[in-house]
Structures are given as C-alpha cells and as structure tokens.
Image (cartoon, helix red, strand yellow):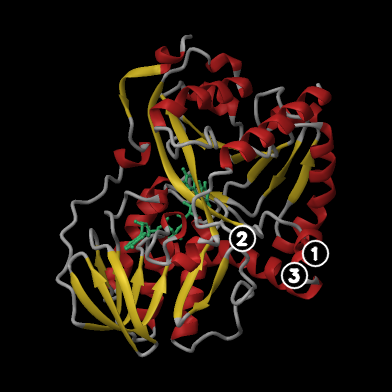
C-alpha cells in the first residue's frame, strides 16, 4: 500500500485518547494573590504534587500553559512501568552500589503507589495490571533479557520469566522477535482519562488548576517568590517546576539538563476481535529491545492496535511520521499491511544525560523531571515525593532527590545531535537484526 493510502477516510491528526477524553475547554479560575506552593506544569507530576500538598493542608496552585489534555500526560501510550529501565550494574557504575539499590527499590514503589492512588481517588481509566512482554530484536538481546528476569522478579515481588522464540506466539503472533520476557509488574491505562481524573481529584481536594496560564518568570527566594504569568502575578512560598519534555526558557538551568524528544503513536481502524485477540494474546503491553524502540498495545476496548515509537528524530508532524510507524507495525504483523490508520499524534518526552529521572532544588526552586519516556507512574510518584518533602512529611529522602544532575558543555537544550544519534542507533539495531537473521 502506498504511504498516502494508509490513512482512513476519517483520519484525524489527533490522539485516539481524545475520543473519550478531549481537552476540556479551559475556564481557568482567577488567580489568587498568594499561595503556599505554585506549581509550573499540570501534567501527572504537577497535579500529583498539588493533590498531595492539599492532603497536608498547604494551598496549591498548578499553572498550566496549555489545556489539560494537550501535553504528554494525555498523549502517551498509557503503559505503566513497574521498575526502572536500567539494571543494578549500570546504576552502580554511575551512582555506586548503595544508591543503585535505593534507586531500584524506589523505582518499584511507583506502580503500587499509582494503583493505590487510582483506587483511593476513584479514577476510572481502564487500568489493568496486564503485565508486559519485552521482545528481543536479536539473540544477544534475548540472552541479556533472560539473564535479568530473576533480578526483576526479586525486585518487583511479581512474576518475570523468559519466553523462548519457539513459544513466543503464546504472547504475540509474530516471528519477528528472538523470544522475549514477560514482566508481570506492569499495567496499562487510558492516559487522558487518568490525567483528567487526577486533575479532578486535585480540584476536589481544594487545589487550583489554572489552564492556559503560562508562567513567564520566577523571581524571589524561598518564602517569597513572585511568578509572572500570562494572566497576572502570584506570590508563593515555594515553587515546583514540573515541565518535563516541555521545559523552556523559564528555567534555563533545567533546560540544559534535559533532552526533549518527540514520540509518535498511530491508532489503527477497528479490527475484528478474533484478530486482535490472536495478535496480542494476553492483551499485555509490548515493548522491544531496539535502541530505537517500539511500544504498542491494544486499545482498552481491545479493538485497535496503538503503535508507538521514535518514528523520527526531526521535527515532523504526526501525519508525516505515520507511514514509518505503519511500516514498523507491519514488520511485526505483515497481515496488517492493508490496515488503515485513523489517528496519529505526537508529544514530548524528556531524557537526561545519565538516563535517570531527577528531583531536587535549584536556586530554591523544586523540580522533578526527566522520566525517560516512562513517566505515567514515575512522574505521578515524584510529584507526591516533592509534595511530601515540601510539607515536611517524607518518612525518608527520595532516592531520586539530589543526585548530581549532569549536562554537557555548550548544550543549551536544543538537541541538534538527535538526528545523527538516532540514525546511528537505527543502523546498529538494523545490523544486529541482520546478523541475528
Ligand atoms: C507519545 C508519548 C508516548 C508515551 N508513552 C508512555 C508510556 O506508554 N508509558 C509511560 O510511562 N510514559 C510514556 N510517555 C511519557 C509520559 O507521558 C511522561 O513521562 C509524563 O506524562 C510526564 O509527566 P509530567 O507531568 O512530568 O510532564 P508533562 O505531562 O509533559 O507536563 C508538563 C507540563 O508543563 C507545561 N508547561 C511547560 N512550561 C510551562 C510554563 N512556562 N508555564 C506553565 N506550564 C508549562 C506543559 O504545557 C505541560 O502540560 C509517553 C510520552 C509521549 C509524548
């Protein structure tokens, strides 16, 4: 099928998630003169911080430049990770063995924390602890995955096992991978319903959520900050920056430490349920081990494939990226070559130079950023942790707090090198796949 023919007649360059939860027309509240804590960004992190602050009696105002629904927290794949991507060896090299253990242990707390939050706040967002299948793009990647399952099972306290290539079709109906692993401590949800539910919970608890209110400048010091916004000034005792992949000139120090990157997703037209049930047999979330990875899943109603990945390292539209994602999907399932795309969309994730999320304080301003494209549970958790710290209610310091936060000389937050690095990674993936074939 020619690239232009992949689009369904009713194709929309918009998130599939907006069918159930479109951005609500913003009617921002009038800004208070003064609050205890002003939060920049109302994604999962900012809203979670606002909610937790209210639970400890502090007044909280989340200031959001866009609408609830426009940024990553409503656009993502809805795949909920149960642990960090890096293992103990990699983390130890960077942070020492003790901190590596603390980071891994804390990383596993995000999933149960999110599950408790959904339950406590009654957020209906199709959450299911589905487990995850990780497909190996070559035999060496399978050996590496298989060597990790015991540690993952021990760390998460849930099942993790390897699935050799000969039994792979019990999980996913493809011959593409060289086997894989199943990790039970992982789930899936509808990200936009979750985001909206979290905003409602924060408002119910008494937080103010001011959409379409961009913060343009932060002045002052702890105890006496002044924020200039597109809708007037606010004074705050403390400030939290939770802008992740949308971090801009407001916070140049943070911007120099974050690598924003577009991630893209397509949704297929509805498929017969006997097809989707065969393609993804247990309706788990799926990722692969390519450096330029794919992540995909069934829609919560089980009718569509939602296929995501780093389709481009350049600034391209979701429509332009869709043919590449379609080709990646048909490499997994050639039978979907004639299946059309109804939605395509994109949003920003944020990577860090040391590949771990960071929370901390710079010049008196709190921040939590850098979720490495895996922030549904992590960003929510870090928001809560920052709130506990500000409210002086943390039982112990968060392991992600106060790590050295590296940048690179001359880097200003514009990752000009991404197209080069992306092409190099793609080439290495291809070479490894070819050798393994
Ligand atoms: C396409 C895509 C797929 C993804 N898939 C997954 C997945 O399957 N699983 C997973 O765990 N993670 C996934 N992620 C990552 C996940 O969505 C993010 O890690 C998470 O949403 C980060 O939440 P956050 O609150 O830190 O930041 P965001 O949700 O990015 O929110 C930051 C907010 O800050 C606002 N902002 C920025 N500057 C200002 C300012 N000056 N004033 C006011 N507001 C400002 C922005 O408008 C934005 O709303 C994906 C991301 C994308 C884009």
Q: Are marks 3 and 1 in contact (CB under 8 Å)?
A: no
Number of numbered discs visible in the structure rendering: 3
* Furthest residue toward top: 1
Tell me, for residue 409, which label it has, or none: 2
Q: Quadrant of residue 427?
A: top right
Circle 1: is it few (<14), some (14-19), or many (20+) Cα within 10 Å? Answer: few
The answer to whether one can see residue 251 in this image is: yes
Instruction: Identify the residue at horizontal 42%, vertical 26% (top origin).
Output: 320
Tell me, for residue 82, which label it has, or none: none
What separation in Å lies between label 3 and label 2 (alpha carbons)? 21 Å
Q: Is residue 429 above or below residue 32?
A: above
- Mark 1 — residue? 93
What separation in Å lies between label 3 and label 1 (alpha carbons)? 6 Å
Q: Are marks 1 and 2 in contact (CB under 8 Å)?
A: no
x and y percent of residue 252 in the render?
45, 65
The answer to whether one can see residue 116 in this image is: no
Q: Quadrant of residue 230?
A: bottom left
Residue 255 left/right relative to 64? right
x and y percent of residue 310 in the render?
55, 37
Q: Quadrant of the C terminus?
A: top right
Q: Is residue 384 above or below residue 142?
A: below
- Mark found first going from the N terminus, 1 or 2: 1
- Mark 3 — residue? 95
Instruction: Identify the residue at horizontal 62%, vertical 37% (top origin).
Output: 420
Tag 1 secondary structure: helix
Nearer the observer, 322 or 125: 322
x and y percent of residue 55 in the render?
37, 81
Residue 235 left/right relative to 170? left
Circle 3: is it few (<14), some (14-19), or many (20+) Cα within 10 Å? Answer: some
Q: Is residue 109 above or below residue 59?
A: above
Q: Nearer the viewer, mark 3 or mark 2?
A: 2
Q: Nearer the viewer, mark 1 or mark 2?
A: 2
């Amino acid at each position: 099928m020619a690239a232009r023919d992949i689009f369904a007649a009713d194709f929309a360059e918009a998130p599939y998630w907006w069918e159930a939860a479109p951005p609500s027309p913003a009617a921002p509240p009038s800004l208070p003169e003064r609050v205890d804590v002003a939060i920049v960004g109302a994604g999962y992190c900012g809203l979670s911080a606002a909610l937790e602050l209210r639970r400890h009696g502090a007044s909280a105002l989340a200031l959001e430049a866009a609408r609830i629904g426009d940024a990553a927290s409503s656009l993502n794949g809805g795949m909920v990770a149960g642990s960090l991507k890096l293992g103990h060896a990699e983390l130890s090299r960077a942070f020492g063995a003790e901190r590596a253990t603390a980071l891994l242990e804390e990383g596993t707390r995000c999933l149960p924390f999110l599950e408790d939050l959904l339950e406590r706040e009654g957020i209906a967002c199709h959450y299911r602890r589905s487990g995850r299948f990780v497909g190996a793009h070559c035999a060496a990647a399978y050996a590496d995955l298989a060597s990790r399952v015991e540690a993952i099972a021990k760390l998460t306290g849930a099942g993790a096992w390897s699935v050799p290539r000969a039994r792979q079709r019990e999980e996913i109906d493809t011959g593409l991978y060289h086997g894989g692993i199943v990790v039970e401590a992982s789930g899936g949800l509808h990200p936009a319903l979750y985001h909206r539910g979290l905003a409602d919970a924060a408002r119910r608890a008494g937080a103010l959520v001011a959409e379409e209110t961009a913060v343009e400048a932060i002045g002052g010091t702890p105890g006496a900050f002044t924020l200039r916004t597109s809708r007037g000034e606010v004074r705050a005792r403390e400030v939290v920056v939770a802008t992740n992949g949308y971090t801009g000139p407001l916070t140049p120090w943070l911007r120099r430490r974050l690598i924003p990157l577009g991630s893209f997703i397509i949704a297929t037209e509805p498929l017969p349920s006997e097809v989707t049930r065969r393609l993804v047999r247990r309706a788990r979330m799926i990722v692969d081990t390519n450096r330029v990875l794919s992540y995909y899943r069934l829609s919560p109603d089980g009718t569509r494939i939602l296929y995501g990945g780093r389709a481009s390292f350049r600034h391209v539209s979701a429509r332009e990226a869709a043919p590449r994602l379609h080709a990646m999907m048909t490499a997994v399932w050639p039978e979907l070559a004639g299946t059309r795309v109804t939605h395509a969309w994109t949003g920003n994730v944020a990577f860090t130079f040391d590949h771990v999320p960071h929370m901390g304080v710079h010049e008196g301003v709190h921040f939590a950023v850098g979720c490495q494209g895996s922030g549904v549970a992590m960003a929510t958790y870090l928001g809560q942790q920052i709130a506990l710290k500000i409210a002086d209610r943390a039982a112990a310091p968060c392991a992600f707090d106060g790590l050295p936060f590296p940048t690179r000389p001359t880097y200003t937050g514009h990752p000009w090198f991404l197209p080069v690095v992306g092409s190099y990674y793609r080439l290495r993936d291809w070479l490894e796949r070819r050798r393994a074939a």
